[in-house]
Image (tube, helix red, strand yellow):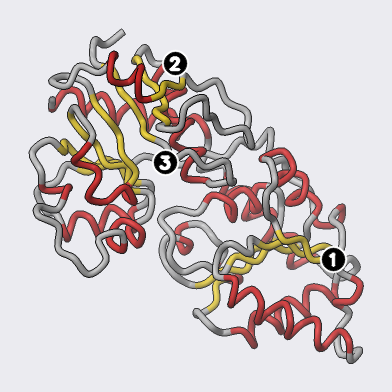
Amino acid sequence: MTHQKIFYFCFSDNQSSGGNKEIYKHTEILNRHGYEAYILHTTKNFKITWFHHHANIVYLDTFNKLIDRKNDFTVLPEDVGNDILSFPGNKIIFNQNIYYGFHIFNKQKPQPYPYLHPQVKGALVVSEHNKNYLRFAYPHLDIFRVFCGVDINKFRFQPLKKKKKQIACNPAKRPLDIAVIYHILQSRAEQGINNLNEYEWIFIENKTEVEVAQILQESLIFVFLSKEEGFPLMPLEAMACGCLIFAYNVAPLTEYVPPTFLFEPGDFLNIAKTIEAIAQSFPVAIESWETISESGRDTVLQYSLELEEQSVAKAWQEILQKG
């Protein structure tokens, strides 16, 4: 076991968040590889309960006793912002979303930017999209790409022919865009122009990971219209479950969403027309959609838990070698 301890700070928020799930997963991976890694929560006795985990959790009192300020590492999410420098020890910024990472500074120029401080030894990123922006902004920063993996045993593939007449979406992401699509389609259904009155919409809110997996396995369509992402997990998990994904044609979604279901931001008419076409053809004439669903499942297999584990272990090996 390495003598250097690694503390991943995580906000004390029990709302479902792919970013927080990745933070927890990193510490579990590192512990399996012989590192001494912890989740740090600042709220006493708090732990995330919406997904299953075996993370080692410490709170501020224990953290302050354990940390070797000269040798140990604290990992901070990008949206901690200027407060990144208030944490002790060597620091790594875990930037899972460049939009949040820059927006947190608002209109004030930090003195200095945390990424430029000598105590910040590098950044972890979850997509080439994130990496390219940070590389341009901070050319001398050490940046380490890690991958997000999907557990295909939890998010099991369900063929389209076994799906329900069900459409799922995450209303926390671009709620205005979701509202436009929902009400366009519902208005037309009320007039008898489409058959969307046969479909149930599921708005995924306040659900456990197990509940989300069940919803996605049952849903024919998953609508995800966020534009400001680092590497969103839920669309990938939906693809693992066989859903047809509707998303905007923006990075990093372009890294894995089938081109057929990538739309220009705000192109509500074509999104609505395509949803209507699928809804009308299901379950009889779905051969072409089945091919896309199966192709999406194959894409997800490239984002395995094994790849995630290898990338995290490799990144930390390089970080610690650099010191």
The residue wearing badge 3 is 147
Which circle, 2 or 1, is nearer the viewer?
1
Q: Is residue 149 above or below residue 65?
A: below
- The residue lying toward the viewer, choosing from 113 and 230, is 113
Q: Residues within 10 Å of mark 3 (few under 14, many from 20)?
A: many
Q: Residue at x 32, y 55 (%)?
A: 130
- The residue lying toward the viewer, choosing from 51 and 317, is 51
Disc 2 residue type (three-letter): Arg
Residue 181: quarter of image:
bottom right
Q: Earlier in the sequence, mark 1 or mark 3?
A: 3
Disc 3 residue type (three-letter): Phe
Which circle, 1 or 3, is nearer the viewer?
1
Residue 179: x, y in percent? 66, 77
Q: Earlier in the sequence, mark 2 or mark 1?
A: 2
The residue wearing badge 1 is 200
Disc 1 residue type (three-letter): Glu
Q: Residues within 10 Å of mark 2 (few under 14, many from 20)?
A: few
- The residue lying toward the viewer, choosing from 121 and 294, is 121
Q: Residue at x 80, y 81 (%)?
A: 186
Q: Residue at x 87, y 90 (%)?
A: 193
